[in-house]
Image (spheres, helix red, strand yellow):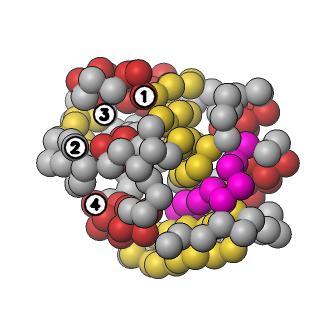
């Protein structure tokens, strides 16, 4: 089988690295969150992202976590089972002089969350798994059961428009929801938290 050498490009759209373009090698199922969706999401997160501790589960290209760091997040854990994806994220962090503000973990989200991983609870969790893989519900359940989120954390979930809505922990409330093409993206608030 001939290996493709075509590369994709990720553009950071806001914050200290605004406009920086980062190359990545496409992999099966890898679809970075589009500029349009990221812009909307980070408008929603603007009041809370600065200083936040984040986790980018199913990180892929790292688009969400890198955008968060660019906009002042204190730290981000990047989690993906693909060696190539993690190597690229590691290279991007080095190029941006941000290795001290991130951790890269090559394993499934489930195995990562089942370990004692969070030195401190996360304030923002990004969940953007491969569409149609039924990973959202068990991932969210682990975050809740293992108390890995801060008291007023925010959880971003991206899914295919045709997918059934996952059952989420009862104390999570929907803050915002939009559809762009074949993608539905939602932001949830944990517990009694709110975005001012």
Comes first in the chain, label 1 or label 2 = 2
Label drawn at residue 25: 3
Q: Is residue 181 above or below residue 146?
A: below
Q: Earlier in the sequence, mark 4 or mark 3?
A: 3
Q: Tell me how far mark 4 sits from mark 1, CA to CA.
A: 23 Å
Nearer-the-camera pick, 160 or 36: 36
Mark 1 → mark 2, Cα distance in angstroms: 14 Å
Q: Residues within 10 Å of mark 2 (few under 14, many from 20)?
A: some
Mark sitting on residue 16: 2
Is 185 situated left or right of 2 in this image? right
Q: Position of residue 50 (x, y in %)?
A: 41, 50
Label disc, if present, on residue 35 of the rendered structure: 4
Choose top left, top right, bottom left or bottom right for residue 121: top right
Front: mark 1 or 3: 1
Q: Residue at x 50, y 73 (%)?
A: 196
Q: Is residue 90 left or right of residue 162?
A: left
Residue 64 as seen in the image, left or right of residue 12: right
Which residue lies at the image location 44% right of the left edge and 53% below the top edge? 49
Q: Residue at x 39, y 75 (%)?
A: 180
105 versus 41 height, above or below: above
Task: Work out whether mark 2 precedes mark 4 in sequence or the reverse, and give the earlier one.
Answer: 2
Instruction: Determine contact: label 4, label 3, CB under 8 Å.
Output: no
Sequence-first disc among 1 and 3: 3
Left or right of residue 20, residue 33 in this image = right
Which secondary structure, mark 2? Answer: loop
Q: Is residue 49 above or below residue 93?
A: below
Query: Where in the figure is residue 60, as x and y percent of width and height?
Result: 45, 40
Residue 38 lies, in percent from the top left, at 35, 61
Residue that carries the numbered disc 1 in the rendered image: 101
> Are there few (<14), some (14-19), or many (20+) residues within 10 Å of tag 4?
some
């Amino acid at each position: 089988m001939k290996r493709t050498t075509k590369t994709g490009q990720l553009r950071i759209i806001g914050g200290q690295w605004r406009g920086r373009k980062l190359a990545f090698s496409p992999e099966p199922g890898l679809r970075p969150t589009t500029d349009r969706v990221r812009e909307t999401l980070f408008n929603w997160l603007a009041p809370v992202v600065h200083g936040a501790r984040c986790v980018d589960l199913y990180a892929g290209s790292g688009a969400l976590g890198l955008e968060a760091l660019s906009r002042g997040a204190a730290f981000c854990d990047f989690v993906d089972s693909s060696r190539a994806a993690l190597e690229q994220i590691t290279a991007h962090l080095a190029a941006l002089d941000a290795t001290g503000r991130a951790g890269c973990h090559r394993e499934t989200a489930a195995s990562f969350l089942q370990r004692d991983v969070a030195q401190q609870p996360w304030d923002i969790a990004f969940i953007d798994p491969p569409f149609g893989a039924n990973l959202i519900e068990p991932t969210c359940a682990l975050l809740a059961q293992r108390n890995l989120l801060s008291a007023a954390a925010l959880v971003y979930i991206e899914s295919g428009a045709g997918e059934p809505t996952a059952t989420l922990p009862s104390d999570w409330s929907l803050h915002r929801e939009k559809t762009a093409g074949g993608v539905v993206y939602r932001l949830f608030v944990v517990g009694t938290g709110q975005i001012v």
